[in-house]
Image (cartoon, rainbow, N blue to C red):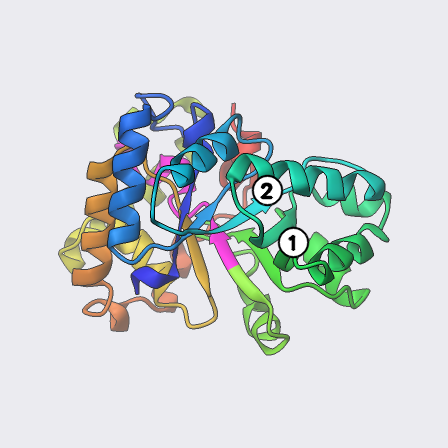
């Protein structure tokens, strides 16, 4: 099941995550982390032009490593005519000749000029990328893609125990052979904050966090395991993007996957719908205060 995991790399180039107190990874920690990930069956990385110098740091690692990760990167907001330049720039920084996936990072890029999709397909035909797609935040964006019959291979979207807005689309996407890549599995670390330490912005979900901790105790697992296995056991989800701040967190995550996801599979059902949150000020991190 570790093969479904994509290691997120925003924290390689940015101080990323509500619970991140250590900042960007050092060069040594980055090397140890990527080596450990690869040696334990994690072969995918997710990055983006907007993740600071993440692409460059990944490329520096690959120059000095025998490990070969498959990489998904995302565009900056750009025009159709600029797309090939940005892709080739990413390839150079990443020290690779081809990406596994290349996604439009902002849906606004598509809305401004929908013909940009044809350019993505042209770059795919040039064998610069295997699969193309979108990173989205809102179900309305997905509805546009479906209604307008836009062809794509990968859809990256947020999904977790609180945010289940896209769930009703999963089966249809799977039938269309679209890979579903899920991010925000831990809601940027919100799930790990002690309920009593929440800031005022999150007080509306204090009881949900209390309930989440209660369920985890009843199943005799930690919150990380519960949140991660909820995603991994979903048959429609192809890849799960997770970010970690250090190798210890990665070890804990992989141990949770290997030891627990199978044993609690039968418990991960619609009973968790009570944890669902509709408030976009909570479930969309860009709205956090």
Q: Secondary structure at mark 2?
A: helix
**What span is in magenta?**
181-195
Percent position of residue 178, x then y: 60, 68
Which circle marks residue 91 in the picture?
2
Above-or-below relation of 219 to 243: below
Q: Are marks 1 and 2 in contact (CB under 8 Å)?
A: yes
34 left or right of 278 in image: left
For marks 1 and 2, the one nearer the N-term is: 2
Query: What residue is at 53 percent from the left and 62 percent from the top?
Result: 180
Residue 77: image quadrant is top right
Percent position of residue 63, x then y: 42, 38
Q: Which residue is most to the bottom?
A: 175
Q: Pointer 1: what residue?
A: 128
**Does the image show residue 223?**
no
* Crowd band around label 1 with a 10 angstrom C-alpha radius: few (<14), some (14–19), many (20+): many
Above-or-below relation of 283 to 258: above
- Front one among 128 and 21: 128
Query: What residue is at 60 percent from the left and 34 percent from the top?
Result: 49
What is the quadrant of the N terminus in the image? Answer: bottom left
Percent position of residue 170, x then y: 55, 68
């Amino acid at each position: 099941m570790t093969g479904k995991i994509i290691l997120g790399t925003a924290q390689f180039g940015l101080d990323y995550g509500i619970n991140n107190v250590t900042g960007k990874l050092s060069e040594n920690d980055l090397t140890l982390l990527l080596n450990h990930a690869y040696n334990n069956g994690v072969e995918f990385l997710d990055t983006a032009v907007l993740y600071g110098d993440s692409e460059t740091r990944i490329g520096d690692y690959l120059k000095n490593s025998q490990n070969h990760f498959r990489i998904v990167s995302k565009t900056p907001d750009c025009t159709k005519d600029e797309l090939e330049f940005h892709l080739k720039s990413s390839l150079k920084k990443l020290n690779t000749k081809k990406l596994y996936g290349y996604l439009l990072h902002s849906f606004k890029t598509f809305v401004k000029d929908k013909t940009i999709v044809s350019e993505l397909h042209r770059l795919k035909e040039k064998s610069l990328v295997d699969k193309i797609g979108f990173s989205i935040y809102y179900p309305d964006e997905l509805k546009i893609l479906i209604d307008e019959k836009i062809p794509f291979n990968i859809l990256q979207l947020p999904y977790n125990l609180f945010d289940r807005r896209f769930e009703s689309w999963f089966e249809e996407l799977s039938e269309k052979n679209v890979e579903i890549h899920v991010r925000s599995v831990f809601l940027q670390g919100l799930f790990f904050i002690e309920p009593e330490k929440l800031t005022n912005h999150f007080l509306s979900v204090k009881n949900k966090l209390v309930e989440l901790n209660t369920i985890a105790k009843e199943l005799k697992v930690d919150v990380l395991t519960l949140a991660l296995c909820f995603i991994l056991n979903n048959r429609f989800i192809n890849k799960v993007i997770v970010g970690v701040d250090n190798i210890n967190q990665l070890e804990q995550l992989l141990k949770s996957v290997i030891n627990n996801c199978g044993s609690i599979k039968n418990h991960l059902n619609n009973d968790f719908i009570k944890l669902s949150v509709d408030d976009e000020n909570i479930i969309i991190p860009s709205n956090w205060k």
